[in-house]
Image: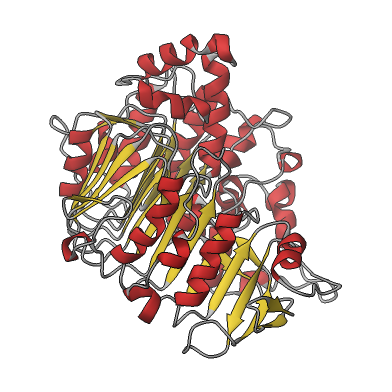
């Protein structure tokens, strides 16, 4: 991922620029091809899971003709290995599966890999019409030659996908292409896209496998009006001024390692009026500015991209703004997002936050225009060895008066500056600590003095605080320092939770239950709107009870 971080310092407008940039880095490590060969599997791993997992290589035991002959129905079921899936029930010799209704049989077919689902047509005359009546699923991971590696030659894979789409009357439920190189297969790629558009494809994952890198995305993809979900990887995005997008039903869009101009993103947001989730993973924007202006977007995710600025200009429905940033320092501007509830991870070293046109600085007097009253969950990365970053924490709390869950990730750093003695003791409270903050989640704490002082500040001022979650691996060490007594069996060592029984009177004198917790943060959780908090998951297999003693130490 170091290449993506370094790309922040370069102007990358084409994949030729990317390749040249990687080659110039070859003296420092792998070649351009090796870097891309490492990046592509990584970004594919970020994708939502396939509808049907790929079969094991041992299952690929068919000849080439059987593998790709998707329309033949003349074979005998007794000669076809697929028939083994539908053996008669043992004991009475009756075929009970064929007695099921067509709807149930279609459901069975929809759960089979691409090849096996098509070959059910040869089982009997009744089965012959079921596959064409079942919405089509195609995954190039299911289309392999026996004895070969998972990487299928581009010609054969493109031919198989084309024939599969052509043989089915539609509609196409989903197509996932992540292992196919379309080099010298531009015509086949155009045919595939045209066929999918004609048969109302709903879900499309389309990746190009290098080399060469500089493959233009077929503009026909932008005219698949039936698409509800679209993920694109390793493409040069077409000029939307010449090819206007027509994606009226698109709700989820992901751009992975894609080169796209800022104007093309603006055009997509303007034309995709049902879009709810927009995500970028290791993509290159020209000129590195993401402007969010959409009346429908609920979530925006930036994952390790080369961006210089993120501007939330006008997003009345935006509820989540999530990023896992690397590289150079960048500006995050939030102008109009009245429903924003989840924000993070804000990295205090990489991000300069601006709310309502006001740059947020440590120790500033926070005015109403610099607040986000809708925010409920906030995640921040902070170096407790850095005085400026430590002083930003109480300032940020004043910016989010209705905050309910606070995530703080402690990042190791050299002690460049020293936080003045008595800093936390001198601070007053704020709206969120007095009335709203219920959960504090501490990631990667290292038992530093400033970390413990911060924790003590939240425990003292948090009048509504009910849960403190410590997500770390050395739970024994932390408990040994914080408590008089450590249980003999600590249980899972991913973290623990402190739960208080009463919401009033601060944390002093309240009972606390302690149980494990684990980190949850990932790209797939970030884009999943059903996940309430994408940053952590609590676990309650083991529970302890703790309380505050008179000398303010925890006792289990």
Q: Nearer the viewer, residue 231 or 19?
A: 19
Quarter that holds the C terminus: bottom right
Residue 160 or 518: which is nearer the viewer? 518
Q: Residue furthest left?
A: 241
Query: Can residue 102 be seen in the rendering of this structure?
Result: no
- Residue 264: give x, y in percent of width and height: 20, 35
Q: Based on the displayed image, in which of its 4 quarters is residue 9 positioned? A: top left
Relative to 447, is 177 above or below?
above
Q: Nearer the viewer, residue 384 or 182?
A: 384
The answer to which of 503 and 346 lies nearer the viewer is 503
The number of numbered badges drawn on the structure is: 0
Report the residue at 66% width, 82% height from top.
513
Determine whether 28 is above or below 431 in the image: above
Residue 68 percent coordinates (x, y): 57, 35
Q: Is residue 23 above or below residue 404?
A: above
Left or right relative to 181: residue 479: right
Q: How is the image coloured?
A: secondary structure
Q: Is residue 88 visible?
A: yes
Residue 419: horizontal and vertical position, in percent? 48, 50
Q: From the viewer's perspective, is 37 left or right of 301?
A: right
Residue at 49% in and 22% down: 210
| Residue 36, x across and y down, in percent | 52, 23
Q: In this rendering, would 22 be left or right of 315?
A: right
Please report the residue visible at 64 percent of the width from the left and 53 percent of the height from the top: 446
């Amino acid at each position: 991922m170091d290449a993506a971080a370094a790309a922040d310092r370069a102007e990358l407008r084409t994949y030729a620029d990317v390749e040249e940039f990687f080659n110039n880095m070859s003296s420092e490590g792998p070649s351009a091809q090796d870097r891309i060969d490492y990046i592509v599997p990584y970004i594919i791993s970020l994708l939502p899971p396939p509808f049907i997992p790929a079969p094991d290589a041992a299952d690929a035991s068919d000849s080439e003709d059987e593998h790709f002959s998707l329309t033949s129905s003349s074979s005998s079921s007794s000669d076809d290995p697929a028939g083994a899936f539908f053996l008669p029930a043992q004991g009475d010799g009756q075929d009970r599966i064929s007695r099921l209704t067509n709807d149930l049989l279609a459901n069975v077919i929809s759960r089979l890999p691409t090849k096996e689902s098509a070959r059910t047509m040869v089982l009997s005359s009744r089965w012959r019409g079921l596959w064409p009546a079942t919405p089509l699923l195609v995954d190039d991971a299911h289309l392999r030659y026996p004895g070969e590696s998972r990487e299928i030659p581009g010609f054969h894979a493109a031919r198989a996908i084309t024939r599969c789409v052509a043989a089915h009357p539609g509609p196409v439920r989903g197509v996932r292409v992540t292992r196919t190189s379309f080099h010298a297969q531009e015509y086949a790629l155009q045919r595939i896209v045209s066929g999918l558009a004609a048969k109302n494809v709903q879900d499309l994952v389309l990746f190009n496998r290098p080399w060469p890198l500089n493959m233009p995305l077929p503009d026909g993809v932008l005219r698949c009006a039936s698409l509800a979900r679209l993920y694109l990887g390793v493409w040069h995005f077409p000029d939307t001024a010449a090819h206007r997008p027509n994606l009226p039903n698109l709700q989820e869009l992901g751009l992975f390692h894609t080169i796209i101009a800022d104007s093309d993103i603006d055009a997509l947001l303007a034309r995709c009026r049902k879009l709810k989730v927009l995500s970028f993973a290791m993509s290159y924007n020209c000129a590195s500015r993401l402007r969010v202006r959409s009346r429908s977007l609920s979530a925006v995710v930036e994952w390790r991209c080369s961006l210089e600025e993120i501007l939330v200009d006008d997003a009345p429905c935006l509820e989540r703004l999530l990023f896992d940033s690397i590289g150079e320092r960048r500006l995050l501007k939030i102008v109009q997002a009245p429903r924003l509830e989840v924000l993070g991870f804000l990295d205090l070293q990489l991000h300069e936050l601006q709310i309502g046109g006001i740059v947020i600085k440590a120790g500033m007097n926070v005015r109403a225009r610099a607040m986000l009253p809708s925010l409920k969950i906030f995640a921040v990365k902070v170096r407790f060895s850095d005085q400026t970053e430590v002083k930003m924490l109480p300032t940020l709390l004043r910016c989010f008066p209705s905050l309910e869950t606070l995530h703080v990730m402690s990042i190791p750093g050299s002690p460049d500056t020293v936080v003045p003695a008595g800093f936390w003791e001198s601070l007053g409270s704020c709206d969120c600590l007095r009335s709203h903050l219920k959960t504090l989640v501490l990631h990667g704490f290292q038992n530093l003095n400033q970390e413990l002082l911060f924790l003590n500040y939240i425990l003292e001022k948090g009048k509504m605080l009910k849960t403190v979650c410590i997500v770390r691996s050395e739970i024994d060490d932390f408990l040994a320092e914080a408590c008089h007594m450590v249980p003999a069996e600590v249980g899972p060592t991913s973290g623990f939770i402190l739960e208080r029984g009463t919401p009033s009177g601060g944390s002093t004198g309240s009972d606390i239950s302690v149980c494990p917790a684990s980190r949850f943060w990932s790209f797939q959780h970030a884009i999943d709107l059903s996940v309430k908090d994408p940053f952590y998951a609590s676990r309650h297999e083991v529970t302890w009870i703790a309380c505050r003693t008179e000398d303010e130490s925890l006792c289990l």
